[in-house]
Amino acid sequence: MIENVLEFFRNLPEKKCATCGEKIEEQHECYGNTCDKCNTL
Ligand SMILES: [Zn+2]
């Protein structure tokens, strides 16, 4: 089951920041569509 989930995420397109278009790396606190730089309020 876990392997299937990992495979699912691997097939997902790269997440990009909605603000600057930068590729978003896997982060523990990444729920939005912006990268770390644009996410700081
Ligand atoms: Zn950004």
Image (tube, helix red, strand yellow):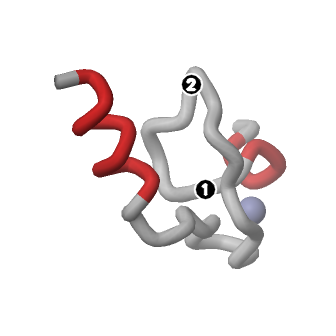
**What residue lies at 27% left-to-right and 36% top-to-bottom?**
5
Left/right of residue 2 with respect to residue 33 in the rendered view: left
Judging by the rendered image, the residue that carries numbered circle 2 is: 29
Secondary structure of the residue carrying tag 1 is: loop
* Ligand 1 picture quarter: bottom right
Horizontal and vertical percent for residue 38? 74, 54
Q: Is mark 1 within 8 Å of ligand 1?
A: yes
Q: How many marks?
A: 2
Amino acid carrying label 1: it is Thr
Horizontal and vertical percent for residue 10? 45, 54
**What residue lies at 63% left-to-right and 66% top-to-bottom?**
17
Judging by the rendered image, the residue that carries numbered circle 1 is: 34
Horizontal and vertical percent for residue 36? 76, 43
Secondary structure of the residue carrying tag 2 is: loop
Q: Above or below — where is 24 with respect to 19?
A: above
What crowding class fits label 2: few (fewer than 14 Cα within 10 Å), some (14-19), or many (20 or more)?
few
User: Which quadrant would residue 20 be assigned to in this image?
Assistant: bottom right
Query: Of label 1 and label 2, which has the lower sequence position?
Result: 2
Which quadrant is home to the N terminus? top left
Horizontal and vertical percent for residue 27? 63, 31
**What residue lies at 70% left-to-right and 77% top-to-bottom?**
21
**What residue lies at 54% left-to-right and 35% top-to-bottom?**
30
Left/right of residue 38 with respect to residue 2 in the rendered view: right
Amino acid carrying label 2: it is Glu
Q: CA distance from mark 1 to mark 2?
A: 11 Å
Q: Above or below — where is 20 with respect to 1?
A: below
The reply to whether the C-beta atoms of the residues labelled 1 and 2 are less than 8 Å apart is no
